[in-house]
Amino acid sequence: MSIQCTYYQEGNIIDYTNTGSSALSAGDPVPMTDAFGVAVYGIDAGDTGPVVVSGVFIVTVDSTVSYAAGDKLYWDATNKLFTTSTTSTTYAGYAAKEKAVGTSVGYLKLNY
């Protein structure tokens, strides 16, 4: 019988090839097709680097909305913040803590 699976890595950090036209900086959001991550280091356009896809991050959020722990959060690339709005955004994960209106910092549990 041949081996069906070979362990490669834990999977909390994955290799990501930056297919965009500009470099990513450490801490930049990295939306992917069906996942969302955060760049560990700078990744130049066309290069491959590490992206965290698991964990809770302190992030900039839409201060005009409140939400409960467990509510879905989305990346708004235009306004460079996380929001509960599904319009022109990318699903990133869910709120690890509740947030009140007027607060611009939230806790995001990545969707991986």
Image (cartoon, rainbow, N blue to C red):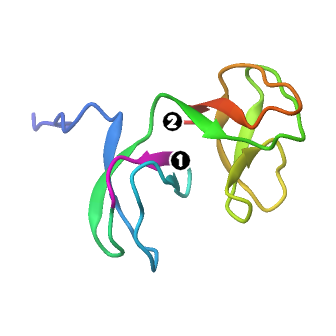
| Residue receiving disc 1 | 35
In the image, residue 105 above or below residue 77: above
Dot 1 falls on a residue whose secondary structure is loop
Mark 1 is surrounded, within 10 Å at the Cα level, by few (under 14), some (14 to 19) or many (20 or more) other residues, namely some
- Quarter of the picture holding the N terminus: top left
Residue displayed at 75% across by 37% down: 104
Q: Identify which amino acid the numbered label 2 is placed on.
A: Tyr
Residue displayed at 72% across by 65% down: 78
Magenta stretch holds residue 105: no
User: Distance from label 2 to label 1 (Cα)?
Assistant: 6 Å
Q: How many marks?
A: 2
The numbered disc on residue 5 is none
In the image, residue 85 above or below residue 94: below
Marked residue nearer the N-terminal end (2 or 1): 1
Q: Identify which amino acid the numbered label 1 is placed on.
A: Ala
| Residue situated in front as seen by the camera: 58 or 45 | 58
Seen from this angle, which residue lies furthest left?
1
Q: Write down the quadrant of residue 58 in the picture.
A: top right
Dot 2 falls on a residue whose secondary structure is loop
Magenta stretch holds residue 39: yes
Residue 34, x across and y down, in percent:
56, 51
| Residue situated in front as seen by the camera: 70 or 4 | 70
**Residue 75 in sight:** no
Q: Write down the quadrant of residue 80 in the picture.
A: bottom right
Residue displayed at 90% across by 41% down: 64
Residue 4, x across and y down, in percent:
20, 37
Q: Is residue 19 left or right of residue 68?
A: left
| Residue situated in front as seen by the camera: 11 or 25 | 25
| Residue receiving disc 2 | 112
Tell whether label 1 touches label 2 (CB within 8 Å). yes
Q: Which residues are magenta?
A: 36-42
